[in-house]
Image (cartoon, rainbow, N blue to C red):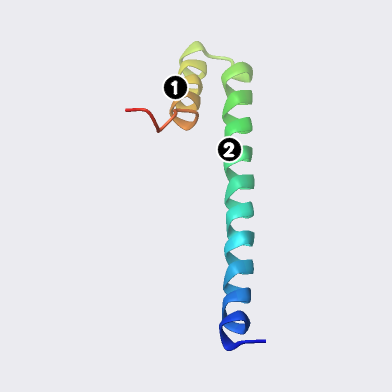
């Protein structure tokens, strides 16, 4: 086993774990805001939640 493999493997694993945790947290945030946009009682809060959901789901490419 080369020194590069010994050093790169833990860094790669940490990157994969960090990426997975970030994706999970983002999904939880989107689901929470989507549920809020339906379940809040006041129309203003529902509008705010929908606006936040639009921001979270905005596509970044193509411009």
In the rendered image, the vertical position of residue 35 relative to residue 17, given as above or below: above
At a point 57% along the width and 76% down the height, the residue shown is 8
User: Observer-nearest residue: 13 or 5?
Assistant: 5
- Secondary structure category for the residue under label 2: helix
Q: Is residue 61 left or right of residue 28?
A: left
- Secondary structure category for the residue under label 1: helix
Q: Where residue 14 sits: x, y (%)?
A: 60, 67
Q: Is residue 63 left or right of residue 48?
A: left
At a point 59% along the width and 59% down the height, the residue shown is 18
Say which quadrant the C terminus sits in: top left
Q: Which mark is residue 29?
A: 2
At a point 56% along the width and 82% down the height, the residue shown is 4
Residue projecting furthest to the left: 63
Label 1 CA crowd tier, 10 Å (few <14, some 14–19, many 20+): some
Upstream in sequence: badge 1 or badge 2: 2
- The residue to which callout 1 is attached is 51
User: Observer-nearest residue: 62 or 21?
Assistant: 62
Question: What's the distance in space between the residues labelled 1 and 2, CA to CA?
Answer: 14 Å
């Amino acid at each position: 086993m080369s020194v590069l493999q010994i050093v790169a493997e833990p860094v790669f694993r940490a990157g994969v774990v960090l990426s997975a945790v970030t994706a999970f947290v983002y999904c939880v945030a989107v689901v929470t805001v989507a549920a809020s946009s339906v379940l809040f009682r006041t129309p203003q809060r529902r509008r705010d939640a929908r606006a936040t959901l639009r921001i979270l789901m905005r596509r970044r490419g193509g411009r």
